[in-house]
Structure formats: structure tokens, C-alpha cells
């Protein structure tokens, strides 16, 4: 995600301090960086796409002696990662610079107004440029006045920081639903989006609340509410070291990311709902005629993303009534698949750089398919080479084992399926509306599932010595079983195997014997009784069964040795919830086994080789 760092001090090394702060935010992922410094009375802005090293290289021979400035690492949302789209953005005469995290929702309308009423010529594609021009229009010798006026017109969730060469002593920053802190130094002060950015310099900070402005000078930090009343804030003493601060106090990125899922789910959905509560695919054109023209859909991906596709198939086939094949990319690309201009090809990829997925996409494109990708990293290769992109809003995923990317991919599949269904007319308005209502409840239900954490940690202590664990499920639960099993094996190195429960009797059941652990997902009302029979089958051979069901389905307690309950929820949507206990279980089992959870052996976050 984007990062902000600002420094106001007495020494002339603002450049070094800000770059150092940006580097400490690198772990969060970014695609470009930039800096704005007041140097010799003039605002100097330097920015570069790619690594911070590119920015450093650009400015290494410039003295840029400065006592104050702001810096930014960007994770693209509007506009591809490029030099011009990087922050800071400046006004027309280059006297004001702004960095910005988050989203300005009404930027299209404001941009239009700035063009028509003020003749502004925009240089970039990003919403941030709107903010700096807006501030510039209201600027009349006092930066905070101008920012306050601009804020009245801005809608969205964001944190911003601004500096101005004509009001050169201060950084003016504001928070609305995006993190912002101010750091109290000696003879200097800071602002930042995240504690790790400034932890090397300060241990005492102010946590800025929503709708508050903070004005930072070298001598002072002042906080104001939205009505411009000064606010007194207690100092927060940071006791974490830099490493745990990056993880927000969690022991591992994986655990942090598991906990970020309610937010990722909420954001992925929120950004696709318009003011009337309807799905807005925002630029992805899928008309009724186009949908009727497709005679087949391929969902192609690897690993966890492939598992999201398995669940997506159920949703799309049910709602849009088009045949869906889900295939791992490494197979698809070499088997001469039947693809033509009546094919819709959906690639799913967190990184957007997975070589197998990219090559499969290219193959489908050559054969005339329409390409839509579901991707987390903006501007990645898969995104660039697709006809349309549906971005997930997981934020950067650092742990190698994918968690929040998977649940946001699932959410995206439901949104796409629902949109296809209502557009094609294969679902009615009533179904659409009730499904939407249920989708909106998912982030809160996901929070509830996270409350199972201590129970799962204790279950992990009972299970961690096992060298084999099986997962079974039917329908969408089979897809989630594959994902639960993958999570477990990749981080704990336990030999784990998942199978559609009805397939067990065709061979695999030979492996079930006394005390073998079987995790049985039975969250589908329609398939519940069938799953109870499958549980009996493995129990009869001595297995130790951990069942999973929704809260009202208690009969499972008669069959299973232990039951994990998830909140009540319609059959189609349970995968969004049922995977979370499996992620937590995998995490705690790996922890008990002393594994390197964030960096499991033999694995890389982005697999760019064949
Ligand atoms: C497992 C995992 C991998 C990825 C796979 C595809 O936890 O992360 O299985 O899902 O390598 O990666 P992306 O989604 O980046 O294409």
C-alpha cells in the first residue's frame, strides 16, 4: 500500500531522512516513489517508477540541502505505475506538492470542474493531481486554510500531506479513513502513514484520528478537528521494535494478513458498488449480447488462485449459466485448448507476474478469446495484457502463503458472477438483491470467524505432531479443502492431501486408518447429509475427524470428534468464511513446528519462471 513520510527539522538532511523512512515502508510493497523538498527556498520534486533505488540513483549527485519535505511510496490504484503518476504531485507553477494515500471518490467530477472552470491541464492519470490543483486554487498565503477548503470538496478515504514553497515552515496533513501519525522528535518532527517509517528517529507519537488535520513544523505539532478546533492528544509511546512494528504487532505477516481479510473483503466489494447499491464493474464492458455470445469460460490460474477459480466456477455456472472450465495454467498452455472468439478467459493472479498464467493468457489471446483478469498488483504483466482488469483490494501481500489475496479473489468471482447473471437475465432482481445483502454481511462474519483464533491455536497444539492430514469436502467445500490442504503443507511441511469427499471410496480411503486426522468441511446445506455419511466412512476406519459446519447444523457433533462452526450463511458464500479457520490452523500448526512461516522453504512469492 502507499506510504507517506514527512520531516521538518533543523539539519539539512531531510532528503536522507525521508528516503530512509520510505525504505522502511518497502516491505509493504510499492511500485514507485518520490520526494518533495523545500531546498534553498524552492520546492524540488523528484520521483521515479520502480524501486526506491531508482529514486536514489536519480538524486545521488544533487545536494538538495533541505530542512523539510515529504516523501511517498506508491501502490498504484488510479493509473499505471510510471514516473509521471508517482507522487508527489504539484500544482501548475510547481509551488505546492501533495502526497496521498487512498482514494478520492469524486475525482472525475472535480477533475472536470478544474478543467472547465480553471483551465487546469492535467499531467497524470491519478486522483492525487486533482487534490493539489484544488489546494492551489484555494491558496491565499496560508497552506492549512487552503487544505481545509479543499477538504470540503473531497469525498473518499485518504490521508494527504502537503508542502508549499511560499509557506515553507510546515507540513499540513489530514486523515480521513487512512492511517496517519505524527512523530515527536528533538528539534524536529515527523508525519508518516505508518510507525516503522519513523521508528528509528522517534518513539513518541500522536495517533491522528479521522477528520483531523495535523500541522507539523520543526518546533511544534498541532492537531485540529474538522471544525478547526485545536485537539489535545495524549502521546503514544511506541514500545515495539522496528520488525514487529512492520507487522503491526503480529508475529508474522501471514497472521497479520489473515486478520486483514475483513477489510480486504469489504474494500473489494465496496469499490464495485455504485450509489444505488448496484454492481459497477467500472470500465469492464460485459453486455448481455457479449455474455450470450460466450459459449464457454476458462478460469486459468496457479496454486491458491486456481483454488479461487474452483469456487468461482460454481458461482458463474449457477448465476450466468455458462459452462466454466477451471484449469491450472501450466497445463492449459501446453494442451492446445479449444479456444475461439466465443471464449471468455479469466486469469486469476495475486502478483500478476506468474509466468504460467501469463503464457496461458497469451495463448488464449492468440486464439481470439476475450481476456479478463482478476489481479491484486496494479499495472502487473497480467493486468497490462488483459482486455479488462478486475482489481482485488487485498493490499500488498507479503507472506509467501496467500491468504487475503485468496478471499478477495473469491469475493471478485462472486461479484463477477452476480453481474453476469443480472446482465444476462439468468438471475432475477430478487435473487440479486438478496445475494448482495448477504455479500455485504461477509466482512463482519469474517471478523467473527477470526474470534476462533485461540480455539484453533489450541487445536493446533493437539495436531502439530501428525505427519499426515486429509481434507475432504463436496461442491465449493472441495475447492476450499484443496486450499486448506495447500496452506497446511506449504508452511508446516505436513504431508496433506485434499479430495472431493465422494471420491474417497474410489481409492484414497485405503489410506485412512486409526488416528489419521481428517478435516471434513460440511458447510453446504444441500450436501450436508452426504458429508455426514463421508464422515462416518472415515470414522469407521478409525480416523480422528475435525468437522466444519455452519452454526445451526449441530448433528455433525454426533459424528465428528471436534467441530469448527462458522456463522450461518448461504451455501454459495461459505468459502469466504470456511477458509479462514483453515488458514489459522495451518498457521498455528506451522508455528508449533517451529517453521519459517513467512518464507517457507523452496517457495517464492511470485513465480516468474516456468
Ligand atoms: C500459495 C500461493 C501460490 C500462488 C501461486 C499463484 O499460498 O501463494 O500457490 O497462489 O503461485 O500466484 P499468483 O496468484 O501471484 O499468480
Image (cartoon, rainbow, N blue to C red):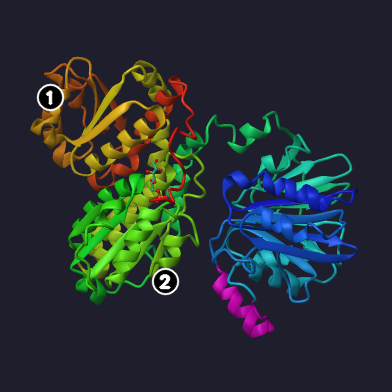
Reply above or below: 438 against 584. Answer: below
In this picture, residue 496 sits left or right of residue 72 = left
182 or 488, nearer to the observer: 488
x, y percent for residue 42: 86, 67
The answer to whether residue 223 is visible is no
Can you tell which quarter of the image residue 532 is in?
top left
584 or 30, nearer to the observer: 30
Magenta stretch in the rendered image: 106-122
In this picture, residue 405 sits left or right of residue 114 = left
> Which residue is depicted at the point 70% across and 68% down?
132
> Which residue is depicted at the point 46% across and 48% down?
606
x, y percent for residue 525: 18, 39
In this picture, residue 373 sits left or right of residue 191 = left
Q: Main secondary structure of the magenta part?
A: helix
- Badge 1 density bin: few <14, some 14–19, many ≥20, Cα 10 Å: few
Reply above or below: 527 against 466. Answer: below
Contact, CB < 8 Å: mark 1 with mark 2? no
Q: Is residue 32 magenta?
A: no
Can you tell which quarter of the image residue 277 is in?
bottom left
x, y percent for residue 324: 21, 58
Q: Which residue is mark 1?
A: 510
Q: Is residue 117 magenta?
A: yes
44 or 539, nearer to the observer: 44
Residue furthest to the left: 506
> Which residue is depicted at the point 85% across and 45% down?
188
Q: Which disc, if any, is residue 283?
A: 2
The answer to whether residue 301 is visible is yes
In this picture, residue 321 sits left or right of residue 129 = left
Reply above or below: 316 against 240. Answer: below
**Mark 2: is the Cβ under 8 angstroms from ligand 1?**
no
Q: How many marks?
A: 2
Amino acid at each position: 500500500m502507499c506510504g507517506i513520510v514527512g520531516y521538518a527539522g533543523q539539519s539539512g538532511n531531510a532528503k536522507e531522512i525521508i528516503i530512509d523512512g520510505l525504505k522502511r515502508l518497502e516491505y509493504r510493497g510499492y511500485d514507485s516513489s518520490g520526494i518533495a523538498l523545500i531546498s534553498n527556498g524552492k520546492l524540488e520534486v523528484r520521483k521515479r517508477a520502480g524501486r526506491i533505488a531508482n529514486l536514489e540513483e536519480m538524486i545521488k549527485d544533487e545536494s538538495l540541502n533541505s530542512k523539510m519535505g515529504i516523501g511517498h511510496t506508491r501502490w498504484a490504484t488510479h493509473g499505471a505505475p510510471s514516473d509521471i503518476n508517482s507522487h508527489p504531485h504539484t500544482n501548475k507553477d510547481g509551488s505546492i506538492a501533495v502526497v496521498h494515500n487512498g482514494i478520492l471518490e469524486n475525482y472525475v467530477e472535480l477533475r472536470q470542474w478544474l478543467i472547465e472552470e480553471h483551465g487546469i491541464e492535467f499531467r497524470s492519470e491519478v486522483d492525487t493531481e486533482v487534490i493539489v490543483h484544488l489546494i492551489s486554487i484555494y491558496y491565499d498565503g496560508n497552506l492549512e486554510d487552503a487544505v481545509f477548503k479543499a477538504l470540503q470538496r473531497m469525498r473518499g478515504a485518504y490521508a494527504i500531506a502537503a508542502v508549499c514553497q511560499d509557506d515553507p515552515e510546515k507540513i499540513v496533513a489530514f486523515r480521513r479513513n487512512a492511517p496517519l501519525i505524527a512523530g515527536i522528535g528533538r528539534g524536529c518532527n515527523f508525519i508518516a502513514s505508518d510507525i516503522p517509517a519513523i521508528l528509528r528517529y522517534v518513539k513518541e507519537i500522536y495517533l491522528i484520528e479521522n477528520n483531523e488535520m495535523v500541522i507539523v513544523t520543526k518546533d511544534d505539532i498541532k492537531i485540529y478537528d474538522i471544525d478547526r478546533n485545536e485537539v489535545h492528544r495524549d502521546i503514544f509511546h511506541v514500545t515495539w521494535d522496528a520488525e514487529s512494528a512492520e507487522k503491526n504487532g503480529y508475529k508474522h505477516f501471514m497472521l497479520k494478513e489473515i486478520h486483514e481479510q475483513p477489510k480486504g473483503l469489504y474494500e473489494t466489494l465496496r469499490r464495485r458498488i455504485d450509489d444505488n447499491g448496484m454492481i459497477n464493474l467500472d470500465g469492464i464492458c460485459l453486455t448481455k449480447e457479449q455474455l450470450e455470445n460466450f459459449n464457454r469460460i476458462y478460469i486459468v490460474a496457479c496454486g491458491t488462485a486456481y483454488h479461487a477459480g474452483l469456487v468461482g466456477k460454481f458461482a458463474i455456472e449457477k448465476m450466468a449459466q455458462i459452462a466454466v472450465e477451471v484449469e491450472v495454467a501450466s497445463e492449459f498452455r501446453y494442451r492446445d485448448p479449444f479456444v475461439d472468439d466465443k471464449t471468455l478467459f479469466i486469469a486469476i493472479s495475486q502478483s500478476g507476474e506468474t509466468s504460467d498464467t501469463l503464457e496461458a493468457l497469451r495463448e488464449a489471446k492468440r486464439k481470439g478469446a476475450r481476456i479478463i483478469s482478476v489481479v491484486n498488483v496494479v499495472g502487473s504483466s497480467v493486468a497490462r495484457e488483459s482486455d479488462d482488469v478486475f482489481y482485488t483490494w487485498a493490499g500488498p501481500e507479503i507472506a509467501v502463503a496467500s491468504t487475503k489475496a485468496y478471499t478477495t479473489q473469491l469475493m471478485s468471482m462472486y461479484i463477477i458472477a452476480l453481474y453476469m447473471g443480472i446482465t444476462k437475465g439468468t438471475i432475477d432482481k430478487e435473487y440479486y438483491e438478496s445475494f448482495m445483502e448477504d455479500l455485504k454481511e461477509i466482512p463482519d462474519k469474517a471478523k467473527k470467524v477470526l474470534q476462533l483464533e485461540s480455539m484453533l491455536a489450541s487445536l493446533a497444539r493437539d495436531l502439530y505432531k501428525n505427519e499426515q492430514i486429509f481434507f475432504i469436502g463436496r461442491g465449493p467445500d472441495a475447492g476450499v479443502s484443496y486450499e486448506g490442504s495447500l496452506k497446511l503443507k506449504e508452511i508446516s511441511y505436513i504431508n496433506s492431501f485434499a479430495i472431493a469427499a465422494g471420491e474417497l471410496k474410489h481409492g484414497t480411503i485405503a489410506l485412512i486408518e486409526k488416528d489419521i486426522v481428517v478435516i471434513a468441511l460440511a458447510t453446504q446445506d444441500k450436501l450436508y447429509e452426504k458429508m455426514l455419511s463421508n464422515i462416518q466412512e472415515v470414522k469407521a476406519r478409525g480416523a480422528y475427524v475435525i468437522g466444519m459446519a455452519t452454526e445451526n447444523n449441530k448433528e455433525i457433533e454426533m459424528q465428528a470428534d471436534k467441530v469448527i462452526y462458522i456463522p450461518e450463511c448461504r451455501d454459495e458464500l461459505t468459502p469466504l468464511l470456511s477458509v479462514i479457520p483453515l488458514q489459522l490452523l495451518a498457521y498455528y500448526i506451522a508455528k508449533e513446528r517451529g517453521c519459517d512461516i513467512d518464507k517457507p522453504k523452496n517457495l517464492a512469492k511470485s513465480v516468474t519462471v516456468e
